[in-house]
Amino acid sequence: MSSVFTPIDSNLEGNFKFWMPYNQPDTEEILTETLYEVTKKQIFKENSYTLTTSVLIKNSEHKKVSPIEWKFVQPFTEENDKNIRYGFTLGLDEHSQDFYVSCKEKLDKWLDCLSSTCIMSGIENDFSIVKRIGKGKSAEVYLAISNENSQKYAIKAIEKATLNAQSMSNLIEEIKIMRSLNHPNILKLHRVYESDSHIYLVLDYFEEGDLYSRIIKKKNFTEAAVAKFSQKLFEVLEYLDSKNIVHRDIKLENILMVSNENDYDFKLADFGLASKLGEGLTQICGSPGYIAPEILNRFSYGTKADVFSAGAVIYILLSGSMPFYGREVKQIIISNREAKINFHQKVWETISSGAVNFLQNIMDPRPSFRVSASEALKHPWFKTQNFEKFYVEAKVNSKLF
């Protein structure tokens, strides 16, 4: 099998050299244990190895390292008349290395540790597919059950034949970003598998569906619930901002609800368009009706673009309608680019001025005037539990922030 990740791995390794000279890796240690390699004379040689979040370190007299972030992992067993040997292969073909362990339990331990960093094989051995729960242009999403602990997962299956240079670059970025994230309100990527035909992303699964489905089902939300949801959402954006990551597709469908007991516990999902900030992003992407105007105007943009999109989500939760609308997508985009927010519908008479003021600050069409995620979290709308009282106080001073 050829792996679509091999070119990245070769760049990290330096022309496919499995072992490289040791340099102090700035990564977190995961595991240090004994492994066995077979020498050219077919002798099993014991050595200590340290696995980190990005490299495997050979703790020999002259330490060596091997980048493992994009290496393909395949377990194996070798049987003869006397015993069974267990091990795993890192890499593919002539650019690979076999490692042996002392028992099956050790193999399972190493595979579990490697699974958070490498590209795994044999997804059919680890998960049982229940049913398809979603379909896109180049990917399908399945509900699956772990064969190890019967836990439910969502598996995103991406057909390799549909990947071009741009979509492959986006997929690599998605995997890199999701592996770097650890936040209670962000969907977790557990493993990445590859087969001859597909790439599989193993993700958290939640039966409650997305925020769009919740709105259709529930019709309306209390302002207190929206405020609590908004605070959690902006804590996520503050976290992404601290890592210089822009999601670029925040919308109702990409927010998964965790519980049916409240309307504010969620997981932000789908990092397919997410990107690390470089010298300045200019690519137009996102979903019409949510896109920050600087993106549509082809200006350089940063994490404040997500703040605007989050504002569109909150506007919908409070009012039950889209902030930008049109009969056709083209009309929605024009309205979205102009970013003129309407607070004149009757529904806004029942919503506090604090909420309106908050939206005005996070949906300002001018990025330099729009607040950041951390600034938004300081808004007084989050500090009150009595919205009726806050509504009266806010009327006295409409420019609260």
Image: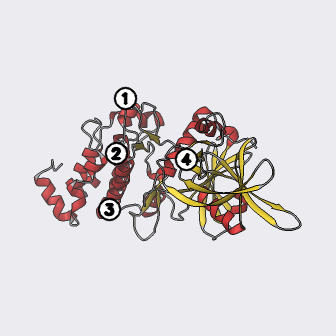
Label 4 with label 3: CB-CB less than 8 Å: no
On the image, the x and y values in percent for residue 256 come to: 48, 58
Name the N-terminal-most of marks 4 and 3: 4
Looking at the rendered structure, the secondary structure element under dot 1 is loop
On the image, the x and y values in percent for residue 232 come to: 35, 58
Which label sits in the foreground, 1 or 4?
4
Q: Is residue 358 visible?
A: yes
Mark 1–mark 2 distance (CA, rounded to whole Å): 16 Å
Label 4 with label 2: CB-CB less than 8 Å: no
Mark 1–mark 4 distance (CA, rounded to whole Å): 27 Å
- For residue 175, the mark is 4
Label 1 with label 4: CB-CB less than 8 Å: no
User: Is 62 positioned to the left or the right of 187 in the image?
Assistant: right
Name the N-terminal-most of marks 1 and 3: 3
Pointer 2 residue: 307
Mark 4–mark 3 distance (CA, rounded to whole Å): 29 Å
Q: Amino acid at mark 2?
A: Val
Mark 3–mark 2 distance (CA, rounded to whole Å): 16 Å
Q: How many labels were placed on the picture?
A: 4
- For residue 228, the mark is 3
Q: Amino acid at mark 1?
A: Phe
Q: Amino acid at mark 3?
A: Lys
- In the image, what residue occupies the spot 42% across and 44% down? 245
- In the image, what residue occupies the spot 49% across and 46% down? 24
Name the N-terminal-most of marks 1 and 2: 1
Mark 1–mark 3 distance (CA, rounded to whole Å): 32 Å
Pointer 1 residue: 299
Looking at the rendered structure, the secondary structure element under dot 3 is helix
On the image, the x and y values in percent for residue 358 come to: 25, 50
**Front position in the image: 11 or 179:** 11
**Front position in the image: 360 or 84:** 84
